[in-house]
Image (spheres, rainbow, N blue to C red):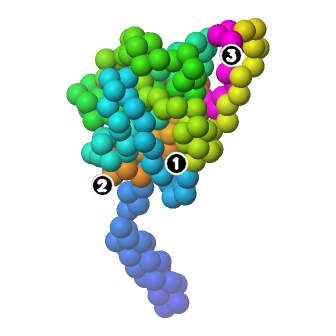
Amino acid sequence: MKTWLAALCAAAAFVLAGCQPASHAPSFKATDITGATFGRDFRLTDHNGHVRSLVDFRGKVVALFFGYTHCPDVCPTTLADFAAALKQLGPQAAQVQVLFVTLDPERDTPALLRQFVPAFDPSFLGMYTDSGALAALANEFKVVYQKTSVKGADDYLIDHSAGTYVYDPKGNLRLLIPYGSSAADIAHDLKALLAAP
């Protein structure tokens, strides 16, 4: 009798466990920073001269990367990886906005950004602001940057943080995609954010 009762309880527990709602939290390849209290918003001018903030892109997944056009490796690689990821998304790519924020406003003029950034994908936007506002923005986003290998007023490199921040379509900061992530992993995470309720 005890054996039968134990088996019945075990079966009931198994059935009830099957009635529990399944977790719908997406599984990301990148670092999930949902709930972060930094990177709340920005106010930047795009390479077409329009002032933008996060609300302007509501309804889209927004990928925000800080870099500079003279960057020899990290920046062009990141933009190329996101361009490849968007190709993998097909029609869903129209629901993603990639923003490239220059850390080098002294050299990265709107004209240069307009030439450099959309070369990777026509939908990408180069963003800029003045040096003072940039310092405050970098602080808000926990981005570090400094000039190195300075050989002249117009000849230097910039060491900088290399991750990409990603917002969901509701404007919530969700992910930090590390430099070197594959296009497939980036596409996976973008799709997950687009599919999330």
Determine if residue 138 is in view.
Answer: no
Residue type, numbered disc 3: Leu
Quick one: label 1, few (<14), some, or many (20+) residues within 10 Å? Answer: some
Q: Which residue is located at x 62 percent, y 45 percent?
A: 139
**Residue underneath mark 1:** 39
Q: Which residue is located at x 58 percent, y 27 percent?
A: 103
Residue 124: x percent and y percent?
A: 36, 24
**Residue underneath mark 3:** 157
Determine if residue 45 is in view.
Answer: yes
Q: Which residue is located at x 76 percent, y 14 percent?
A: 149
- Res 15 → quadrant: bottom left
In terms of secondary structure, what is the magenta stretch mainly? strand
Q: Is residue 155 above or below residue 193?
A: above
Residue type, numbered disc 1: Gly
Q: Are marks 2 and 3 in contact (CB under 8 Å)?
A: no
Q: Which residue is located at x 69 percent, y 12 percent?
A: 153
Q: Is residue 157 above or below residue 4?
A: above
Q: Which segment did they paint magenta?
A: 153-162
Residue type, numbered disc 2: Pro
- Return the residue nearer the eye: 156 or 16: 156
* Sooner in the amino-acid sequence: mark 1 or mark 3: 1
Q: Secondary structure at mark 2?
A: loop
Q: Is residue 184 above or below residue 43?
A: above
Q: In the figure, is residue 74 to the left or right of 175?
A: right
Q: Secondary structure at mark 1?
A: loop
